[in-house]
Image (tube, rainbow, N blue to C red):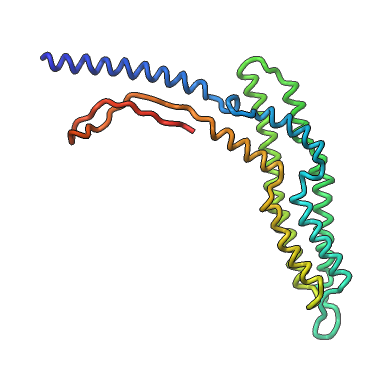
């Protein structure tokens, strides 16, 4: 009878301890509830810094796109000067005569996209102005500002990520077309091969917008909440019995 009472008292004490531990766990989790407010630097700070830096950098932000575009353009010019391959009848191959213009067109198109469109997009500046106009009193208002800033960062990163693959594909195809259409043993063959190698530049050197997005996501992953609680573990000295224990986990 006494043993049963002791077990009951022990079980009640265990429930009290577990309840207190759970309450402290919930309080700890509440501190880490919004990683947008815990991350350093915050998204709003990143947006403000980038809005100022983007004005200073100008076209340098788009060099991963401009370098292969320039090489493709120059390849088209070289092939236009040296001529395309000749068919068996001794005339210029009709399927190859458009190759130089394709290379020139692709190069000019990417310069137009980079400087005429991307360089005119003030994504960070617009976001910084919007964030500055929002209230910053309550936690909800702060969270709204950070999420608006993150939306701007992720939008810019998504644009850059799509464009790098389009740039790689279009410049590689244009370079391959010009290499296949160039006269044998001419400089345009080697320039076209070099252009094909240069087309991989956007994959090797990330655009600034994509880099910032990856950094912000990585910063948020480092915010974690330690969770502790009372549990039952298998008693190592017995096959069927359990023993009380303490579990700690890190939720990312």
Q: State the image coordinates of residue 190 (x, y, percent, origin top left).
A: 77, 70
Quick check: can you spot residue 95?
no
Using the rendered view, name the quadrant where residue 47 is placed: top right
> Left or right of 222: which side holds 15?
left
Q: Residue furthest left?
A: 1
Q: State the image coordinates of residue 29 (x, y, percent, origin top left).
A: 48, 23
In this rendering, the answer to whether 105 lies above or below 122 is below
> Left or right of 77: which side holds 22?
left
In this rendering, the answer to whether 211 lies above or below 169 is above
Q: Residue at x 70, y 52 (%)?
A: 202
Q: Residue furthest right?
A: 81
Q: State the image coordinates of residue 189 (x, y, percent, origin top left).
A: 78, 72
> Left or right of 150: which side holds 105?
right
Using the rendered view, name the quadrant where residue 242 is placed: top left
Using the rendered view, name the quadrant where residue 220 is placed: top right
In this rendering, the answer to whether 109 lies above or below 235 is below
Q: Residue at x 20, y 16 (%)?
A: 8
Quick check: can you spot residue 217?
yes
Name the image quarter holding the N terminus: top left
Query: Which sits in the foreground, 99 or 199?
Result: 199
């Amino acid at each position: 009878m006494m043993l049963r009472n002791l077990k009951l008292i022990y079980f009640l004490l265990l429930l009290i301890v577990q309840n207190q531990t759970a309450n402290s766990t919930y309080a700890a989790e509440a501190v880490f509830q919004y990683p947008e407010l815990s991350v350093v630097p915050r998204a709003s700070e990143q947006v403000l810094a980038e809005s100022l830096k983007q004005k200073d950098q100008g076209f340098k932000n788009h060099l991963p796109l401009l370098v292969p575009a320039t090489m493709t353009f120059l390849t088209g010019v070289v092939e236009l000067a040296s001529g395309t391959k000749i068919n068996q009848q001794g005339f210029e191959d009709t399927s190859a005569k458009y190759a130089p213009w394709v290379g020139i067109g692709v190069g000019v198109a990417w310069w137009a996209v980079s400087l005429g469109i991307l360089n005119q997009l003030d994504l960070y500046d617009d976001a910084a102005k919007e964030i500055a106009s929002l209230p910053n009193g309550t936690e909800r208002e702060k969270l709204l500002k950070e999420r608006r800033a993150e939306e701007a960062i992720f939008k810019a990163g998504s644009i850059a990520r799509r464009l790098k693959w389009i740039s790689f594909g279009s410049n590689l195809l244009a370079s391959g077309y010009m290499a296949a259409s160039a006269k044998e043993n001419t400089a345009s063959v080697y320039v076209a091969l070099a252009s094909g190698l240069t087309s991989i530049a956007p994959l090797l050197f990330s655009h600034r917008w994509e880099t910032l997005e990856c950094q912000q996501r990585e910063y948020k992953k480092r915010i974690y909440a330690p969770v502790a609680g009372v549990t039952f573990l298998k008693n190592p000295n017995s096959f069927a019995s359990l023993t009380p224990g303490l579990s700690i986990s890190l939720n990312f």
